[in-house]
Amino acid sequence: MEREVGTVICTSSGPSAFEFDFVVTNTSLSVPVRTGQFVEVSTEEGKLIAQVTEIMKTNRYFMHAEAVREYERGGKPLTTIFPVDKWEYIIAKAKPLAISINGQLERVTFPPSPGEKVRLASQDTLANFLGLDIENGIELGTVRYHNIPARLNLTRLLQKHVAILAISGAGKSYLASVLTEELLLRSPAKGRVAVVIVDVHGEYVSLAEKVESSGYVDFSDRVSVFKTSFFQIAVPQISERMFGEFQPQISPIQIRELGRVLKNLKRKMYETGIPYSLQDVIREIEQDEKMNIRTKEALLGWLYDLEETGLFGPVESPNLDKIVKPGHAAIIDLSEIISLRKKQILVSYVARRLFDLRKQEKIPPFVLILEEAHQFCPEARRELAISKSIIETIAREGRKFFASLCLISQRPVKLSTTVLSQCNTHIILRITNPYDLKHIGESSEGIDRTVLDVITTLNVGEALIVGEAVNFPLFIKIRKRRSKEPKHALNLEDAAKKFEKQYT
């Protein structure tokens, strides 16, 4: 039996199918009911599920200001004259959300009766109403104000993509680490996916560290880190159109001529078994007598520019089809790279290779976790976003091939509208920028003005989930990590002291 908290009462406006009030009768706790809690009431239609929207206190002795003033004019508090404490009541307003009939949810069409008891929603009722997967779900935390694990169904959460949005320092990477832990802890019987993390600042590499201390889970045998200094893009895997993405200024004629050169090189590679490099492509173009001199000079300029990045080689390293495994996470650490263009080239290649491999079923279903997503798929023209095209392609078509995206951004207003609209689940932590809030309100279903106002006041470790993964907007308290957190950098004061000790 769930805890009774109150009784439905009559007011001038209800109870109705849209709102009802109840007096809080269980005052055994200091805070017996909270705004945002889910409650249930029995009705003629079935079990009504509602959410508390407002809480007020009332006391008949303090309802008239002039009376309070007159009574206390003599210097005595009103509490010494009347039994004030016995007449203080808590009144809560609740919004009906659904009727549960034999586990099926229906629209509310009939109000609860005055005098009906109001109870906190039970775990079974709430799990069914919110669409939680208590047995096999991804546990991100607990439902706020309810001791119920927020376990989300894997398919509903990831198959149609997810976006994690918040200001800097609100806990985006922490939440992504919790999500990664959940994916790595799944058993084969529950269904495991591969995880690929594009780590811009090296925030996830601690997942691969060996843990000796008790109290933490050791994920080192399930996580691999690949530094970009050892990363190599295989030139034979790149088509002329991919070269056109890396160098958006290449003209259609130049792409056509480059395609002819690459075709010849591929034929030689199949004959000799020796893969070719970018230098081989350059050499082949230099020796090509059929190519127009202007086209040749332009192509050589573009390819020499790519050669200077140091990202290209004859073979792929690491082999993406070997490192993407069920229940395993591959972290691509971009923290050593300063150039945004180089980062975009790498992300473009990795995303396209993963998608192609998945379409051929050479790798398992995967989720690509992309930090600072607004850097790689911004709402900007293609010339400023090399990796935008393939990310938008995966956003549109990935669910058909079980290739999922998890996009993390602190500036959703700068994120591609196409990509954000394809993320059917949004997990939103604290956001205060009015432009970002407006953008989220317009792109996320189920968010009204009241919910947007709550987003600005969320504490670190609290989040709102809306969209495909849940039936109703859900506020959660994010659970603690099971892996050891990375060592925090020095704060400003310690950094200043350290500098002075070194150089004075």
Image (tube, helix red, strand yellow):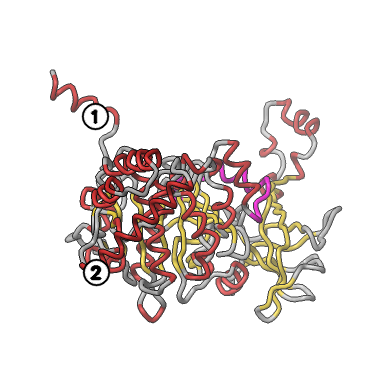
Residue with the mark numbered 2: 271
Residue 438 at what x, y percent from top left?
A: 63, 41
**Mark 2: which amino acid?**
Glu
Residue with the mark numbered 1: 495
Query: Could you tell me how far apart the alpha carbons at marks 2 and 1 are, in whole angstroms?
Result: 59 Å
The residue located at (54%, 70%) in the rendering is: 132
Left or right of 379 in this view: 16: right
Residue mark closest to the camera, 2 vs 1: 2
Which residue is farthest front?
Answer: 289
Seen from the viewer's position, the closer of residues 125 and 299 is 299
Please state, as top left, top right, bottom left or bottom right, where the C terminus lies in the image.
top left
The residue located at (41%, 76%) in the rendering is: 191
**Mark 1: which amino acid?**
Ala
The magenta stretch is 445-461
Asked if residue 109 is positioned above or below residue 22 in the image, the reply reads: below
Label 2's element? helix
Q: Is residue 459 visible?
A: no
Q: Do labels 2 and 1 touch, CB within 8 Å? A: no
